[in-house]
Image (cartoon, rainbow, N blue to C red):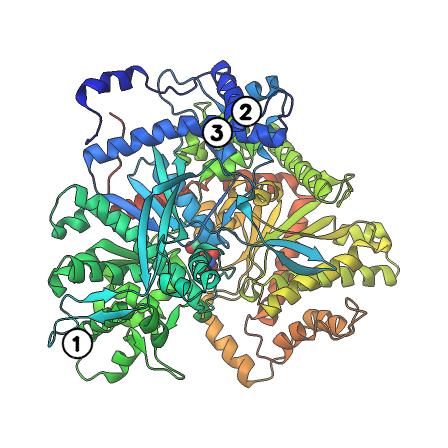
């Protein structure tokens, strides 16, 4: 490896090599050093926040040493690398995760989370309180962003030479406050405190251009080298976050770009006496990475978003190619050295940017360049929902990126030309598949089409989803390219965060129970099948149940703390109260409205029994103790989702204050659902709900998290629920509702016929209309009623309501009357959840999409 250090000086470098701490004593020395020098504090003013920072700095030092070695190792071997381009990385907290990964499994490595916990305690702090100081890195909306975070964890754990590339937003996903039952968004300025987990690389800067115009030799076509003279210029500055693997010394890199003004200055303006405006123009640069767009499964088409996308694609590609060029290999070998994964269509401009670089700057022939491009990229689709499919107005792209628009047109021209040869005279086909949509009010670029055409592999994220994209939105492309280009990689989650970190008690019980008495299963999840033989062991069931109880109490504690020290749920009957949880983005397709309608139904039925003279014991026999938890954010501009949040809170206000039903039913909306709250909520669930309209949820990943934590799930035959059923057995999951294949016909019926509603649902809707939950504004929830009664019930609430209720009744029965059966189901679910490790998922990508191999320490 190149170095500027003269050979004779290198011995000295080696002699003074920085060493990792390897025991509690050495950790404490580091810790105190960081308190006193890095933080400029002391024994006399070190609070929990400072302790968090000092602990993080100390642990980070160890990671950085391994990070450096990993990078040197990869540089020396120069293998094919993977780059994961994602606009979202929903990382959550870093310190606890780093502590779980701190022991590398190497000989002589004495470090462990327990060791650090003890060391911190000796210094006067409780580790839990220290960990609690860390703000979440919430640079994502939901499943898509959290998937990217799980993937970088598994890439490091699997020792793959892989980097993530994203944006360093100054404001992550907004913090949600619930005020008078309504969602209120407040900014998440997560960088308020210094962030020990990032390394600013102020020397790594990439100049990014926008606007301007294109020049080319007279008479030459757009296919020949052209020069784009950009107008506005900004700088992309790199910030690196170390991503440690589990039981390995591999520490990979997540590189996030931040926008800065260039050092140039508009002297013309300045000399005209407009100093202030020339500075303001420069500040415009920083707005590019100011904020994460808070939409999940929805594209708003804002120019600033397009500016973000290009900024990030151009900076990342520049960086990737700079690294490739160091190996002095010819361009045609780029696809043998580099695999770039497009996480949804957000990074699709990278396809165009690479073609531009190869043709305009590297002077490759168009077709030679295009071959290289398509062999380099692959694309993951994450949704079939129309409103989420990205389209950009041609005019906007042409204005912001004039050369790129020319290239898009040329890509499209050759593509359509090839298709025309294969399917002559099929004009309809050409207009359906064209990258350019000829729509009113103006033409649009269909980013998904561009991503498919620019990639060698396209994948869906669960079997049903992949089947759906192949038979609906991308069907024409399957006919054109053949089925081999389309493949499935079912999503997964990292068991380190979602089991070991979120649920230490369960992780411990599993280690103690498995034959090898170790935590190896966190790497080889198929080992979990060893639990199956204890599924009917009553003593083991009791221990299993105790862990769940402990986690339910932990949730009650958290809610109490968030509520200013006042209990939100009663402590009296936690063990016999079913914790029913639905936490995810609020969206009509995810059907939180179905859930809350079910809650209203339950409440009305209880009240009816009481009114008819039943005793509270009789009511309890039919409707035993239950708390319905909800959590999730709505996009700030999504009216219906916000109304659903208000309905949940309004129902909570009525039900929770109704003395007559004596705590048998409670409704809790947990404000500001995020990764660290998920880590407490998920392990506490007895039951969780994954009840999207069939065919709408591409995969879902929280379903996997709940199962991994011993919760049972109620769900529709949608997304990864299908494969969860296959893996854990259909007797261990509560499935209900219509199938994806029937959805279209049902919608059609609703549109053209007057389909009668089930009596149960009718009653719920009438009570809503009566204003029982909105006395101050009787018609407040009318839009939710009308969506079902008047507007075609697009999400099929009425079609699934009865089977949903029946399924919930079954849940009550098994939970309350057959607890041992319930525990058996729970144990067997965990025993068979191994398939959903993101390690498996990354292996599949590595083999079938990227063709990359792990690089291990030798
Ligand atoms: C999503 C899907 O909605 C989820 O079903 C999926 O699990 C996730 C990861 O593949 O991607 N697509 C999206 O736009 N947001 C998501 O969470």
Residue corresponding to mark 3: 57
**For ligand 1, which image quadrant applies?**
bottom left
Mark found first going from the N terminus, 1 or 3: 3
> In this rendering, which labeled residue sits more in front, label 2 or label 3?
2
Q: Left or right? Give the position of 228 relative to 196.
A: left
- Residue at the right extreme, as displayed: 613
How far is disc 2 from disc 1 in space, using C-alphas? 66 Å
Residue corresponding to mark 2: 35
> SS at mark 2?
helix
Q: For the residues labelled 2 and 1, say whether their Cβ atoms are less than 8 Å apart.
A: no
Asked whether mark 3 lies closer than 8 Å to ligand 1, one says no
Residue 192 point in image, percent of width and height:
56, 44
Residue 787 point in image, percent of width and height:
61, 75
Quadrant of the drawing holding the N terminus = top left
Asked if residue 2 is positioned above or below residue 832 in the image, the reply reads above
Residue corresponding to mark 1: 417
How busy is the neighbourhood of tag 1: few (under 14 within 10 Å), some, or many (20 plus)?
some
Q: Left or right? Give the position of 308 relative to 817.
A: left
338 or 264: which is nearer to us? 264
Asked whether mark 1 lies closer than 8 Å to ligand 1, one says no
């Amino acid at each position: 490896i190149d170095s500027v250090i003269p050979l004779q000086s290198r011995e000295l470098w080696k002699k003074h090599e920085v060493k990792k701490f390897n025991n509690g004593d050495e950790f404490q020395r580091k810790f105190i050093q960081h308190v006193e020098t890095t933080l400029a504090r002391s024994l006399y003013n070190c609070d929990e926040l400072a302790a968090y920072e000092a602990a993080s700095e100390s642990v980070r030092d160890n990671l950085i040493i391994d990070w450096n070695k990993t990078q040197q190792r990869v540089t020396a071997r120069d293998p094919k690398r993977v780059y994961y381009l994602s606009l979202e990385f929903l990382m959550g907290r870093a310190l606890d995760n780093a502590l779980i990964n701190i022991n590398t499994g190497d000989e002589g490595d004495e470090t462990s989370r327990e060791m650090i916990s003890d060391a911190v305690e000796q210094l006067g702090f409780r580790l839990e309180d220290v960990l609690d100081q860390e703000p979440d890195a919430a640079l994502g909306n939901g499943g898509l962003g959290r998937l990217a975070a799980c993937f970088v964890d598994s890439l490091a754990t699997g020792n793959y030479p892989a980097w993530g590339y994203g944006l360093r937003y100054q404001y992550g996903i907004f913090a949600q406050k619930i005020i008078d039952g309504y969602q209120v968004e407040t900014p998440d300025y997560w960088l308020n405190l210094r962030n020990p987990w990032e390394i600013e690389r102020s020397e790594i800067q990439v100049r990014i251009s926008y606007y301007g115009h294109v020049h080319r030799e007279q008479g030459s076509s757009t296919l020949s080298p052209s020069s784009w003279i950009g107008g506005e210029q900004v700088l992309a500055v790199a910030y690196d976050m170390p991503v440690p693997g589990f039981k390995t010394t591999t520490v990979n890199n997540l590189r996030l770009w931040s926008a800065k003004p260039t050092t140039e200055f508009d002297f013309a303006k300045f000399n005209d006496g407009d100093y202030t405006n020339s500075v303001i123009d420069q500040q415009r640069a920083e707005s590019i990475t100011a904020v994460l767009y808070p939409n999940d499964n929805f594209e708003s088409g804002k120019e600033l978003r397009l500016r973000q996308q290009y900024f990030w694609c151009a900076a990342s590609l520049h960086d990737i190619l700079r690294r490739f060029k160091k190996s002095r290999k010819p361009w045609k070998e780029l696809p043998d050295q580099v695999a770039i994964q497009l996480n949804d269509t957000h990074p699709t401009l990278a396809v165009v940017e690479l073609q531009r670089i190869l043709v305009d700057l590297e002077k490759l022939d168009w077709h030679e360049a295009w071959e290289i491009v398509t062999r380099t990229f692959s694309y993951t689709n994450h949704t079939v929902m129309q409103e989420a499919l990205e389209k950009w107005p041609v005019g906007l792209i042409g204005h912001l990126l004039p050369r790129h628009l020319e290239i898009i047109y040329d890509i499209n021209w050759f593509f359509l030309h090839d298709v025309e040869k294969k399917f002559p005279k099929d004009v309809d086909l050409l207009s359906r598949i064209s990258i350019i949509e000829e729509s009113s009010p103006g033409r649009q670029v269909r980013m998904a089409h561009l991503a498919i055409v620019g990639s060698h592999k396209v994948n869906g994220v669960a079997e049903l989803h992949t089947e759906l994209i192949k038979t609906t939105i991308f069907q024409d492309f399957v006919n054109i390219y053949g089925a081999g280009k389309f493949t499935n990689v079912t999503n997964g989650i990292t068991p380190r965060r979602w089991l070991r970190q979120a649920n230490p008690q369960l992780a411990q019980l599993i280690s103690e129970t498995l034959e090898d008495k170790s935590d190896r299963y966190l790497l080889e999840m198929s080992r979990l099948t060893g639990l199956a033989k204890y599924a009917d062991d009553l003593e083991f069931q009791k221990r299993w149940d105790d862990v769940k109880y402990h986690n339910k109490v932990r949730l009650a504690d958290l809610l109490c703390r968030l509520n200013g020290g006042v209990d939100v749920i009663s402590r009296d009957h936690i063990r016999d109260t079913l914790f029913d949880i639905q936490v995810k983005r609020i969206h009509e397709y995810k059907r939180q409205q179905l859930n809350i309608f079910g809650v209203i139904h339950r409440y009305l039925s209880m009240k009816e029994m009481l009114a008819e003279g039943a005793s509270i014991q009789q009511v309890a026999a039919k409707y035993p103790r239950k708390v319905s938890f909800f959590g999730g954010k709505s996009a700030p501009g999504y009216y219906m989702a916000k109304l659903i949040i208000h309905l949940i809170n309004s129902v909570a206000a009525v039900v929770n204050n109704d003395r007559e039903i004596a705590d048998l039913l409670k409704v809790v909306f947990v404000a500001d659902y995020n990764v660290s709250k998920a880590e407490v909520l998920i392990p506490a669930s007895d039951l969780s709900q994954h009840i999207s309209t069939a065919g709408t949820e591409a995969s879902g990943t929280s379903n996997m998290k709940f199962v991994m934590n011993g919760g049972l799930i109620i769900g529709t035959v949608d997304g990864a629920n299908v494969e969860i059923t296959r893996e854990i057995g259909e007797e261990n999951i509560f499935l209900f509702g219509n199938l994806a294949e029937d959805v279209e016909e049902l919608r059609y019926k609703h549109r053209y016929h007057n389909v009668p509603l089930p009596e149960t649902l009718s009653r719920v809707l009438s009570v809503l209309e009566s204003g029982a939950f909105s006395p101050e504004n009787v018609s407040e929830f009318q839009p939710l009623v009308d969506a079902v009664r008047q507007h075609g019930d697009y999400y099929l609430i009425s079609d699934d309501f009865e089977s949903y209720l029946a399924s919930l009744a079954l849940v009550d029965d098994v939970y309350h009357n057959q607890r041992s059966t319930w525990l058996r189901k729970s144990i067997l679910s965990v025993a068979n959840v191994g398939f959903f490790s993101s390690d498996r998922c990354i292996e599949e990508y590595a083999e079938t999409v990227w063709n990359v191999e792990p690089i291990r320490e030798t």
